[in-house]
Image (cartoon, rainbow, N blue to C red):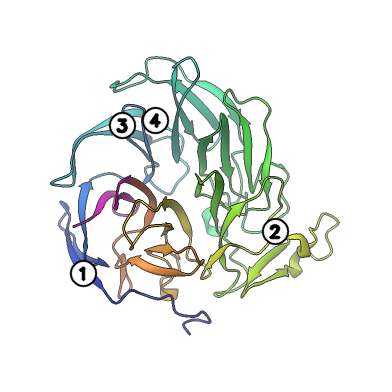
Amino acid sequence: MQNGYPAVAAPPNLTPHRINLANGKTFSLNLPENYQIRVAAQGLKRIRFMAKSPDDRLFVTDMYDLTDNRKGTVYVLDRFDSKTGKFGKITPYLKNLRNPNSVAFYVDSNGNQWLYLALTDRLVRYRYSNGETAPKSAPQVLAKFPDYGLSYKYGGWHLTRTVVIHNDKVYVALGSSCNACEEKESVRASILEMDLNGKNQKAYANGLRNAVGIKWANNQLYATNMGADHLGDNKPEETFYRIKNGQNYGFPYCYQYQSRIYSDDQFKRSAKKVNCSTVPLANATFPAHSAPLGLEYFDSANSDELKNSFLVALHGSSKLKLQRGYQVSRLKSDHTSEVFINGFLQNGTVYGRPVDILRVGKDAFLLTDDYAGVIYYISKK
């Protein structure tokens, strides 16, 4: 047991791989011995979520820093060399954005290509043309979101928005405005569903405090979710759900700990409280304050180390003494987890904070790190 949790298994074959960054920082990251890790791009800022365009280019968001700002950028990365594991060209595609966290692409029935961009206060889309280095048209505003709340100091606001598209519908995840409170706007702490043009917006799921990572796999929507900070170092657990349409996942009234759902006493007298017996257990959990973000599914076409499992980026707790997160975990089909990459936190020193994972071929994926401003390329040797 560690800090009240069973130790997460680390495969015995994790081996150190030396990382040398252009800024002079040198450290080791540990991953399975038959995998290699290389720096695909560096010198960026608060690099976040990735998406492949219809012409197979990599787009990635950069929120610049932890403040609410309009210095964000969307980059397009070209000329990837699988032998060196590096991108040969990085181009700013959009600049001066308010906290861009996520992009998604869609090709409609008429062959029009669209880039969807999730900002703190709105969801927009641009017409996209193959090979372009900047949009050729003005953005269409599809939805507006509330953009105020308590600061990071109080565990609140959650100014990121994440967008994915599936079966001609757009899904956007919005976090809560606070650490734990009853929201004024129903869109907070939810995943929204809307038409491709932003119309017919509705809640797909509620009661998710901060589901930054959402992804469709095998025709199911999956999400990571971060729990509140006021219940101590060991609870609530961070959760991983297969999302059901119309389900309420309990926030702020209920939370999960050691395979049970509990009521938060802070809201026990609320007339709005949820019946916690109706809140489902998560499909998998991580220790409190691990901060799970991006996720990716690897199907049966991959090798044994990855097939039929998810990789989840654990961003890590701001309370370093907990030593939680700061790794990439593999969630297996039996809902147990094991460490796939660690070393981002060593002896109290932070070397990186994983954010998003994008599969780029059999047994290969990209990993963003918004602390070091790096994109890593991980592949089987």
- Distance from label 1 to label 2 (Cα)? 41 Å
Q: Amino acid at mark 3?
A: Asp
Observer-nearest of 298 and 2: 298
Q: Which mark is residue 252?
A: 2
First in sequence: mark 1 vs mark 2: 1
**Residue 280 coordinates in the image, percent (x, y):** 69, 61
Quick one: SS at disc 2?
loop
* Mark toward the viewer: 2 or 3: 3
**Is residue 373 covered in magenta?**
yes
Residue 344 in view here: yes
- Distance from label 3 to label 4 (Cα)? 25 Å
**Residue 286 coordinates in the image, percent (x, y):** 51, 67
Q: Badges 3 and 4: C-beta atoms under 8 Å apart? A: no
Task: Name above or below for residue 300 compared with residue 161.
Answer: below
Quick one: SS at disc 1?
strand
According to the picture, the residue beneath numbered tag 4 turns out to be: 96
* Mark toward the viewer: 2 or 4: 2
According to the picture, the residue beneath numbered tag 1 turns out to be: 16
First in sequence: mark 1 vs mark 4: 1
Q: Main secondary structure of the magenta part?
A: strand
Q: Badges 1 and 2: C-beta atoms under 8 Å apart? A: no
Q: Residues within 10 Å of mark 2 (few under 14, many from 20)?
A: many
Q: Residues within 10 Å of mark 1 (few under 14, many from 20)?
A: some
Looking at the rendered image, the quarter that the C terminus falls into is bottom left
First in sequence: mark 3 vs mark 4: 3
Q: Which mark is residue 56?
A: 3
Observer-nearest of 13 and 64: 13
First in sequence: mark 2 vs mark 4: 4
* Mark toward the viewer: 3 or 4: 3
